[in-house]
Amino acid sequence: MKIEDMILPKIRNIPPSGIRKYFDLINEMDDVISLGVGEPDYTTPWNVCEAGIYSLEKGHTHYSSNAGILRLREEISYHMKNNYNLRYDPKSQILVTVGGSEGIDLALRSLVGPGDEVIIPEPSFVAYQGCTKITGATPVSIRLRAEDEFKLTPELLENALSPRTKILIIPYPNNPTGAIMTKDELSGLVQILKDKDILVISDEIYAELTYEGKHVSIATFEEMKDKTIVINGFSKAYAMTGWRLGYACGHPAIIQAMVKIHQYAIMCAPTTAQYAAIEALRNGAASVDEMVREYNRRRRVLVNGFRKLGLNCFEPLGAFYIFPCIQSTGLSSDDFCEQLLISQKVLMVPGTAFGECGEGFVRACYASSMEQITEALKRIGRFIQ
Amino acid sequence: MDEILSILEKNCRYTEEQLAVMTGKSPQEVNESIRNYEKENVIVGYTALVNWEKTEIENVTAFIEIKVTPQRGEGFDKVAERIYKFPQVKACYLMSGSFDLCVIIEGKSMKEVALFVAEKLAPLESVQSTATHFVLKKYKDKGTIFDDKLEDGREAIFI
Ligand SMILES: Cc1ncc(COP(=O)(O)O)c(C=O)c1O
């Protein structure tokens, strides 16, 4: 028996991450400035950490209910209503997950399988492709365009639909482009989707990190409410990536199905993290505001810096990414990133890591200190000359 | 407006151009606001936050609680002025509670600080009593943790 042959082909055929080599390179270098990671540089606000510690001191070291501590689900319900005007019943419409990642996985596993198509606008978070393939369903990529500022347009959506389309992923605010979708822009999509038997997974993990104006969820359209699973979590807004906590909200039947997989695969999300998250929702808004204000400054500095260096980029209004175009350098995304790392010790991620249509672009994350961002810009400037 | 203040309060070394980019304003607007703040004494100075413990230079800090008799017509302000004009006094606050003025003194040695209190503060006519508390270790000052190394603890993982 060859052990390798025992691995399911659909898993075997998932390609390994194309940017592994960068991390191998970094490990041998000093003084690298990384604009390559996708998580906050901040540590979790102390009141939130302290609530986690206190829960341990109180002996809350057990499993929680499968769907999550009810008090946390109530806080999530309140948060969704208050911030996004979305009403979800804490008992039947909210599931606390191990990061937004698990929410995406559960939703896909509950809803699609071989023969179904999942529409994935790209460039976007790599997990959509991976999780879709694991279910046996077929990912259908939409190539978003720089001239649309990487927004999903009704025309692009229409072209991707087929009778087998079962799910559309709406990934805004977007990783890696920083694009957002306004209410008007979403309404164009709603016109197409409202009469179709297509569900939406709306990945709103960066919702709180929206600059200039508030995030709007597609689920706020009455026609879409029942058809949308909203994914959010604590990783990005509250700088809690390591706690592994997120949530999914949606129609009771879908949430119930997701709870079934969750209870067998995971049992429940980490209890300590859930207690910390209650504090985050109750008393974390000021910390989030402060981080958002600082991200916004860094965003402006980095966009301005790239433009001054002659790298085109549209104004990204969400998440903490900028997606400049590097075609003017004559290099491919991959060559640009590799040469930049080797010669100037600045790490960015090639756009192609997020889908083929990311060629010609690179992702820079501005969740780094202002000093690092300023220094990175100097080095990138030297590289381009 | 306030955004410029909150940025400068944390780091006053940014240039006007940098501040302009960060806040989405023009350099002229930033320059004007800063000049106004300075003129109106909203910004009263620019200083570096020094951890003297890391230097060779001896430096002690003490908190002095002072009880005073307020003066007719002038309240506490006159006494406070007598006190805060000494350059050794780094901060001076009027307090609620069981004492009236809280004064922060810096000096080269405990002896120097104690002498200053004994010779300059305690004998003042309206000072009823003083209590001196020496700082043994500074963990955090002006919102900055002194021993916090700014290390990036993030692992190179791909997301
Ligand atoms: C678009 C997007 N969705 C979801 C996630 C998952 O985050 P988590 O599982 O930490 O909640 C990430 C993380 O990078 C992301 O970028």
Image: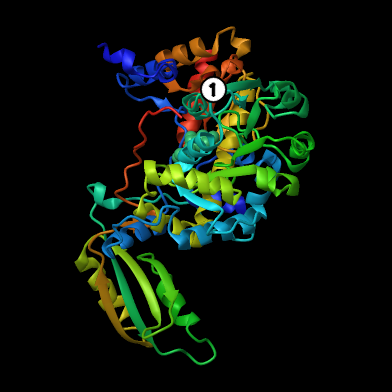
> Where does residue A67 sit, x and y in percent of width and height?
45, 53
Residue A217 appears in the picture as rendered: no
Residue A122's image quarter? top right
In this rendering, is residue A198 above or below B64? above
Please determine whether, in this image, residue A195 is positioned above or below residue A2: below
Total number of numbered discs in the rendering: 1
Q: Amino acid at mark 1?
A: Phe
Q: Secondary structure at mark 1?
A: helix
Across and down, in percent, residue A283 comes to 49, 62
Residue A284 lies left or right of residue A213; in this view the side is left
- Residue of label 1: A354
User: Which residue is at a point 60% across and 43% down the rendered structure image?
Assistant: A229
The image quadrant of residue A65 is bottom left
Q: How is the image coloured?
A: rainbow
- Mark 1 closeness class: few <14, some 14–19, many ≥20 residues within 10 Å: many
Residue in view at x 45 percent, y 37 percent: A39
- A98 and A214: which is toward the camera: A98
Quadrant location of the C terminus of chain A in the rendered image: top right
Between residues A285 and A354, which one lies in front from this camera angle? A354
In the picture as drawn, the residue positioned furthest to the top comes out as A330
Of A287 and A310, which appears nearest the observer?
A287
Where residue A381 sits in the image (x, y, percent)? 54, 19
Q: Is residue B61 visible?
A: yes
On screen, residue A379 versus residue B16, left or right, reads left
Q: Residue furthest left?
A: B111
Residue B102 in the image: state x and y as whole percent: 38, 75
